[in-house]
Structure formats: C-alpha cells, structure tokens
C-alpha cells in the first residue's frame, strides 16, 4: 500500500512538474534548458505517478501511447528541417517568425525542433519506466 503522504504529494506535484517542464521547453531555444531537459522533467512526473498509482493509471494520465509520442516527436523534429531546405539553406538553419508573440516570445524552427525532442524524450522515458514497473509487478 502506497503512502498517503506520497500519494497526495504526487497528485499535487504532477501538474507543477508538467508546467515546469513546459517552462524549460519554452526558454530552452534561447537559454539553457530545452526539449531534452523539459522532456526529462515531464517523464519523471509520469514515472512518479506510475510508482504511486500504477502503470495503467499513469498511462491514462498521459493520455497518449508513449510509442506514439516518440513517432510524433521524431516527425516534428524532422519537419523542423524542411523550411531551411526548401529555401536552399543548410540543414537545421534556424528560421524565425518576424513578430514576437506575447507570452511565448520569438518562435521558429529551433523551437519546433525542441518540441520534437521534448515529445521523444517523454515517450522514451515513460516507455522504459512503464516497462520496468510492469516487469516488477510480474
């Protein structure tokens, strides 16, 4: 039986960790952070949830199949290279939208690449941890 304190803390920490992971993602293309670190924080949040409530409830909280997140993340990361190639620029050249958006700031292909990395890292982390938790339960 899991600890009541840990279960309560996990319910409160999950949304905070996800918000922090998005913060790391959004500031990462200009400052330290980014898709990898943000994805690790989000993966850790769902891993903690799975440790307390079980893998099936963590998968319901995630709402997406982790392997589908890996595929979508890879697709988004590859798509981020297309605009530069279409303009005849070297692969992975950063292209930026001219207008600064409120709250988000500047957006461009580096942010799109970071989103892809973010999704891949969440998918890989949760796939590995969910498999370990399921193997432990057998």
Image (cartoon, grey):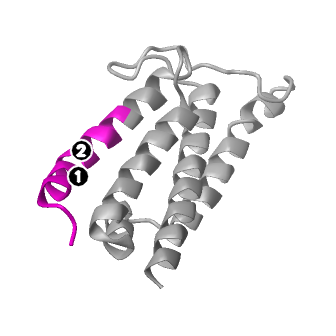
Name the residue at 38% across, 61% down. 62
Figure check: 59 above or below 80: below
Instruction: Residue under label 2, please give it.
Output: 13
Please state if 62 lies on the left or on the right of 70 as rendered: left
Where the N terminus falls, by quadrant? bottom left
Residue 26 screen position, x and y as percent: 45, 27
Magenta stretch encompasses residue 12: yes
Residue 55 screen position, x and y as percent: 39, 72
Give the residues in magenta.
1-20
Figure check: 73 above or below 55: above
Name the residue at 63% across, 27% down. 110
Q: Is mark 1 on a helix, strand or loop?
A: helix
Residue contact between numbered discs 1 and 2, judged by CB atoms under 8 Å: yes
Q: Is mark 2 on a helix, strand or loop?
A: helix
Figure check: 98 above or below 45: above
Figure check: 26 above or below 66: above
Name the residue at 87% across, 26% down. 88
Residue 50 screen position, x and y as percent: 36, 64
Residue 104 screen position, x and y as percent: 39, 23
Please state if 103 lies on the left or on the right of 105 as rendered: left
Instruction: Residue under label 1, please give it.
Output: 10
Q: Which residue lies furthest to the bottom in this view?
A: 138
Q: Give the number of the disc on residue 99.
A: none
Q: Which of 43 and 51 is in front in this view?
A: 51
Alpha-carbon neighbours of circle 1 within 10 Å: few (<14), some, or many (≥20)?
many
Name the residue at 54% across, 17% down. 32
Q: Which of 78 and 17 is in front in this view?
A: 17
Query: Which picture quadrant has residue 92?
Result: top right
């Amino acid at each position: 039986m899991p600890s009541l304190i840990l279960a309560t803390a996990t319910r409160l920490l999950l949304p905070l960790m996800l918000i922090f992971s998005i913060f790391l993602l959004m500031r990462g293309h200009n400052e330290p952070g980014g898709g990898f670190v943000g994805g690790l924080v989000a993966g850790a949040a769902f891993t903690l949830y799975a440790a307390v409530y079980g893998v099936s409830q963590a998968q319901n909280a995630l709402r997406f199949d982790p392997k589908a997140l890996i595929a979508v993340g890879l697709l988004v990361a590859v798509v981020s290279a297309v605009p530069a190639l279409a303009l005849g620029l070297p692969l992975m050249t950063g292209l930026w939208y001219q207008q600064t958006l409120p709250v988000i700031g500047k957006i461009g292909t580096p942010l799109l690449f970071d989103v892809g990395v973010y999704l891949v890292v969440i998918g890989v982390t949760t796939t590995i941890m969910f498999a370990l938790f399921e193997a432990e339960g057998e």
